[in-house]
Image: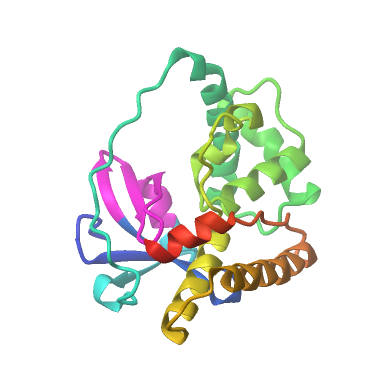
Amino acid sequence: MNFRDPELVLVKHFRGEMKSFFQVSGLNGQELILRDVESGGRFSFLKKDIETFLRNGKLKAMSVNELPSCILDNPLSRRKAIPKTSGDDLGSKQMERRYQYVKGVIDIGLPAYTEKWLSPYIKNRAVEIGDDHPPGWRSLAGWMKLYIESGWEKKSLLPRHKLSGNRQPKLHLEVGALLDSIVLEYTYKHVNIRYMKAYHDFLERLEALNKKRETDGLIGLQPCSYNALRRRFKA
């Protein structure tokens, strides 16, 4: 696949007919930088991982002309590298170690993240990567959940104390998609938008979504603030 094609769009489908759209905004050897068309968030992947996601259906390719016209309103900008400080070394090493286990699970396509499948995998993977202190299967299952729910963002595997310093947390993809659906609905159906009513509708739908997630064994999602919703309307 030609990842340099400016018309290429990658689509990720979620439960409830929610979708996220990505374009390639950077190429660095075997690394691809994907940009979320709606939120502007950027995610780094190995080229071969993206190709695997496309083969197994976790991602689908489409043309930019097939995008809903209402979401493709911001041009791609060139990614700026963020300098790494020495204080990040320990957290980064732990993230890389976790990623080696997570990536292996994705590569071989384990059918379930249970003790039956993960325990023997962990033993073999620990030998492959030279890890003297392999994780328990529940820990790996938790890492898989974090990685998948973040939209395959590698930074989701950072130890929690490293993530706590982020004062501007990114919206979860499903929360962002739900928020966008509220904005679109109110924009098209109402001349005078009542932001507080829109926010209450957002909270009610998020509560319903969280009930479905709990049924599926997933953690509940946190809502954005009222001011964040207003900013979304004015974006």
Residue at horizontal 44%, vertical 58%? 231
Is residue 21 in view?
Answer: no
What segment is highlighted magenta in the picture?
24-52
Q: Is residue 76 above or below residue 125?
A: below
Q: Is residue 25 magenta?
A: yes
Q: Is residue 50 above or below residue 129?
A: below
Residue at horizontal 21%, vertical 66%? 7
Q: Specify whether 210 is left or right of 44.
A: right
Q: Residue furthest bottom?
A: 189
- Quadrant placement of the N terminus: bottom left
Q: Position of residue 108 (x, y in %)?
A: 57, 51
Residue at horizontal 28%, vertical 36%? 80
Question: Which quarter of the picture shows residue 123?
Answer: top right
Q: Position of residue 47 (x, y in %)?
A: 35, 48
Q: Is residue 15 above or below residue 171?
A: below
Question: Which quarter of the picture shows residue 199?
Answer: bottom right
